[in-house]
Amino acid sequence: MEYKKVCFMYRHKDYAIDGIRSALGLAVENMYSYGVVMDTEIDELDELTQESIEMLRDMEGDVYSTVPANVEKNGFEAITIEELGEKLREMTHIIPYGIK
Amino acid sequence: MKILNVYQSEPDETVQKLVQIVTRDREQDSFDLHAENPDYDTLVDKIFAADQTICWW
Amino acid sequence: MAKSLGIFVSSPENLQHVIGITKAAKAKGSNVKVFFTWKATTLSKDPAFKSLCEMADDVSICVDSYKKQGFSIDDVPEGLTPKKMATQAQHGIIIEDFDCYLSL
């Protein structure tokens, strides 16, 4: 069986946290699931969201950001737009989430 | 692998760059959802004909 | 036989597109499932939402998102049943079981 690979991208800060929850929702359905916070700096994450990200990582998913402040503040993996583009090529499903 | 890029607004520089990388060496089609009165019938035909649809913001 | 289509809705600005695409896909004999999440669950209060529920084969919303948007889970939107106030597992079904996928 081939596992699905899904990448969510978030460009609006009001959509990032719930979008990460959606990514976790697919990881528990046995998919490789990733989230990428782009363009926008988000607040420091609460404990519940940090736990969600840890769970996502335990299931071989991850959360990335193109914004250095998010990497520093919230422990996201750093990614450039070029690297993201290459990563998207491996995905079975690409989800530009919410609004920008 | 045929990719359908659907645009909800005029693609900015970031989206253009991602589309360029994702569709490199692949067949592609596009649809402007932000057009006045989009032709949904054509869009559905394009979705059915594609292997993957990406609906950009 | 027409391909099946799953639509994942996360933008609160796209109800008209969801309805237009569902209508076009149904006219081609497609099986259409729609799932609304986060701020897009507010669209379930739009007067046009009920017509989408009648047209599509399956419509559900994320009940947790709906609650976070300030609605009571007992306030079931017109066109849905309590069973359709669901979880992100519905998104998983769309990805796994449907031929074509669209996020809006």
Image: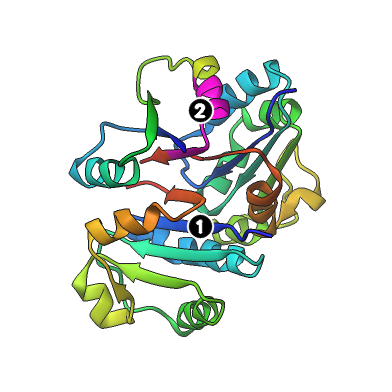
Badge number at residue A37: none
Say whether residue A3 is magenta: no
Side of C12 relative to A29 (left or right): left
Could you tell me which secondary element the residue under label 2 belongs to? helix
Is any atom of residue A12 visible in this view?
Answer: no
Q: Quadrant of the N terminus of chain C?
A: top right
Could you tell me if the residues under marks 1 and 2 are in contact, i.e. CB atoms within 8 Å?
Answer: no
Q: Residues within 10 Å of mark 1 (few under 14, many from 20)?
A: many
Say whether residue B48 is magenta: yes
In which image quadrant can residue A50 be found?
A: bottom left
In which image quadrant can residue A78 be found?
A: bottom left
* B21 and A50: which is toward the camera: B21
Vertical relation: A54 (above or below) C90: below
Query: Which chain does the numbered disc 2 sit on?
Result: C
Residue sitting at 65 percent across and 55 percent down? C92
The residue segment tinted magenta is: B43-54
Q: Which residue is mark 1?
A: A6
Q: Kindly identify the amino acid type of the residue bearing the numbered disc 2.
A: His
Looking at the image, is mark 1 or mark 2 nearer the viewer? 1
Vertical relation: B27 (above or below) A26: above
